Amino acid sequence: MHLVADRLQKKFGATTAVAEVSFAAAPGEVLGLLGPNGAGKSTTISMLAGLMRPDGGRVHIDGVPLGTGADPTKRRLGLVTQEIALIDELPARMNLEFFGGLYGLAGRLLAGRIAAALELTSLGDRAGDAPKEFSGGMRRRLNIACALLHEPQILLLDEPTVGVDPQSRNAIFDTIEALAGAGRTMVYTTHYMEEVERLCDRVVIIDHGRVLADDTLTGLLASAPVSNTLTLKYDVSPDGAALEEIRNLPGVIRVDLAGPELSVSATDLGTAAPRVLERLAARGCSCQELTSRRANLEDVFLALTGRTLRDT
Amino acid sequence: MRSTLTALRALVRKDVAIFLRDRRALVVSVLTPIVVAAFFGSLFGGGGAGDNVSKVPVGVTDLDGSTLSRAVVEALAHDESLATDLMPEGDAHQLVKTGKLRAAVVIPAGFGAAAPAALLGRAEKPSIKLFYDPSQSVVRSVLAGIVTQHVMQEVTRPFTSGKGVSSPFTIASQAVSTGPRYNGYAHSFAGMSVQFTLFMGIDAGVALLLMRETGMWRRLRAAPLSRGVLLGSRVAATTLIAMLILTVVYAAAIAVFGVRIAGSFAGFAMIAFAFAVLAATTGLMIAAIGGTVAATRGVATFSILILVMLGGAWVPAFLFPEWLQNASKILPTRWAVDGFDAMTWRGLPLASAFAPVAVLLAWSALFALIAVWRFDWEGD
């Protein structure tokens, strides 16, 4: 494993920010780290980046314990902060030279790395311009490029697409996928479900400083107490006996009636839907409209934390 | 080690590049102290303060019109300390009241007859009115002495073969310093260099606070750099920028205002360096103990203004009450201003720079210790 977070704990005074967080990420894996505000996500990222010393537990990079300050193990890590941490007054190339210099890069080696980072993030033609003249998406891409110069094996991306237009977002996704393809390990935090679904091989959901779930997306959908939903509209609402009959059907988890709209949650819609329609038709209910929705990560998150991803 | 030096160089170069690229801030940083120092310098005698004594503008009213009173008026007009202007009493009163004249002398009617008689004790002494601006109280004493001298000379002239009673001595004034000539701008440039370099130190400290707000500080700490490198680079960069400001400001002082480093050049350079380090560590301490950017900037600016005021940067410390002159010797700003004065117009040797340098570096060490002690390393 490239990255191992082993029973991380952190307190600030009497407040426990991280009670116990453990997970691991393999080479080439993109791990989504999700959690509501105050869940301990930022503190966990800070400990993973070597910015903060855990009160308990340890971070290991390729089996080497990670320290803070001048610990050389930090060279294996790259941090893309949520804030765009660039020097607006200096041209993009000088920004890259500065961040490369922080890791001891200089001369031809640095020049080569800068060229590669600019190419990867499609900013080669704007290297001489200051970031203050860039669009939000270009600034985000340069923000990522600055973290790549020292070629870290592990990249920590803290909401790297906030405030970015769809085109730039896709460009960032392409960059991340290329990096993962090259064997880099990535820890990715976001509030956008579609980003997790597209990019992340595995998802860790934390809340109240603890890991609530750690699995692939498919695994989470299969194991979490969430379901697919069938919504039906009727001219005449089904009566109580009809609702009771549907509730007792195999695979049906929940039945809700709101006016003429009936919602049926079931583990397997393919099996449940025909039976529900058949029972209601037998009771004289004529369906006017029918929609179905597959369970997604949003539902998993809601079920585990009580909040939606966007609410966090 | 090599990698650390590369990182240190990158950090310092970044700060200096940001300073140099902001043309407007750059101009303000060097132009403001020059303009303000030029103004204060002109108030304190300008470039020729050692040779020229400015004349006091005084109104004169002669209500008598006698031979004696006209002779006194003539004598006052030729006094090297005064610039007199004959005018009616009402005008003289009004001009003093509005601050356009420092003082006015009114010779009463009957003065020509009464004064010689009073000298022999045969009549009441006539009263010469003296209007003066209360903000210029020193002028009152000076003018009273000059009027007395000229009146005595003219009144006694008939009794002394036409020569009159005069002072039995002359005063030969000589400005004294080791340097070649006092330049009023030398002190003002010392004071304003100190003030505005410290302001730049505040800006450097506030910039560090801003780095926390923009995520840059997180990113710097993510790199494998020690606290010593991160904070040391800030001190090094700010010291370099402070040296740059001092160099440009003093270059202007020398080229345009005739200021000379009449003492030890090495001593001047040492004091400039020690003061630049002080400005840098002041900024670091501000970043360590500061809260929000706005509050920190306000409190720091106020503190610096008090420090430079008490350090004699605005007006020379010898104008302070004696207790304040002694008390202000504890302040680093006083040592900086006195140190620059010593190496410029006082023309003192290298040895005279050692004490100011030692005091400035001691204060710098204290500020740096406070900064390291109070710095929130894990905060963003």
Image: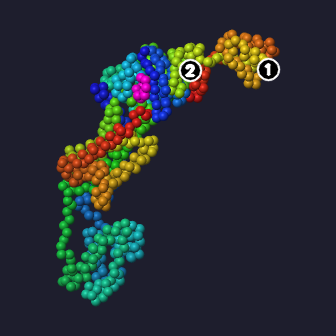
Magenta-highlighted residues? A48-58
Seen in the picture, residue A126 relative to B185 is either above or below; the reply is: above
Kindly report the secondary structure that dominates the magenta region of the rendered protein.
loop
Please tell me whether residue B213 is drawn above or below residue A249 in the rendered image.
below
- The part of the image, by quadrant, that contains residue B215 is top left
| Secondary-structure class at tag 2 | helix
Give the residue displayed 52% in from the left and 18% down from the top.
Answer: A214
Q: Which residue is mark 1?
A: A239
Residue A148: quadrant of the picture: top left
**Foreground pick, A10 / A159:** A10
- Which quarter of the rendering shows the C terminus of chain A? top right
Q: How many C-alpha atoms fall within 10 Å of the one at disc 1: few (<14), some, or many (≥20)? A: few
Residue B98 rendering spot, x and y as whole percentages: 41, 68
Residue A82 visible in the picture: no
Q: Residue at x 30, y 40 (%)?
A: B239
- Badge 1 sits on which subunit? A
Determine whether, in the image, residue A88 is placed left or right of residue B337: right
| Amino acid type at mark 1 | Asp
Q: Position of residue B145 (x, y in %)?
A: 27, 74
- Name the quarter where the N terminus of chain A is drawn: top left
Asked if residue A279 shows in the view, the reply is yes
- State the separation of the CA atoms marked 1 and 2: 39 Å
Q: Which residue is mark 2?
A: A194
Image coordinates for residue A80, horizontal then vertical, percent: 44, 26
